[in-house]
Image (cartoon, helix red, strand yellow):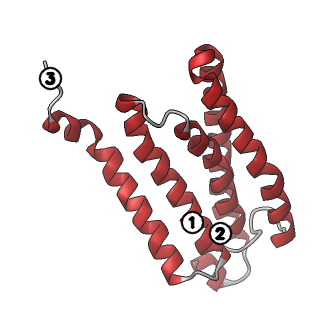
Amino acid sequence: MPFTWLDFLSTFAIYLGASAVLFLVALVAILLRPDHPAARAVALAAANLGLVLSLSVDFLCGYRFTWLYPLAEALLPGTLLWFALSFPTTGASVGAGDRRQRSALAVGVPALLALGTLQALLFRANPELHLRITETRYLLLAAVLLGLLASFGHQLFASRSPEARMR
């Protein structure tokens, strides 16, 4: 039975639709506040997640960009961590400023890129190890998301300023 366009849309429309919405969120965040660190962080996180969702369609059926998908997926915890460190206020989750954020990015981004490169190389060479690294990365992503929620909760309940709690 051939895979028709209707089958393709019913299977992958949610991925591509969510990806388009995330790219739109990234664009709006940058257009509205290009100078604000939280806007840059949400734009990068949304664009990265949109890239992962759009590449997952190829990863599931086309296999044209199998080398790019692990790189985008490896950067996802880092972009979400940067978002957690800069939203709603810079350094709200750890009480640090821009210097700690830049040093974490300087160490984290090359490490995540190396992990993504390793994943891309292991995809065909050693699928079992590739799967174990992917599972570890998803656990890291879950930990980052829990940290993001803790950061929001801390900002909501611990801030003295009513304006900061509204943000």
**Total numbered circles:** 3
Residue beneath label 2, please? Answer: 87
What residue is at 39 percent from the left and 53 percent from the top? Answer: 19
What residue is at 43 percent from the left and 33 percent from the top? Answer: 59
Residue 122 falls in which quadrant of the image? top right
Q: Is residue 82 left or right of residue 23?
A: right
Q: Amino acid at mark 1?
A: Val
Residue 71: numbered disc? none
The residues tagged by marks 3 and 1 sit, at their Cα atoms, a distance apart of 40 Å
Task: Please report whichever mark, 3 or 1, sits nearer to the chain's N-terminal start.
Answer: 3
Do the CB atoms of the residues marked 1 and 2 lie less than 8 Å apart?
Answer: yes
Residue 42: numbered disc? 1
Can the viewer see residue 97 in this picture?
Answer: no
Do the CB atoms of the residues marked 3 and 1 lie less than 8 Å apart?
Answer: no
| Closer-to-camera residue (157/137) | 137
Quadrant that contains the N terminus? top left
Residue beneath label 3, please? Answer: 2
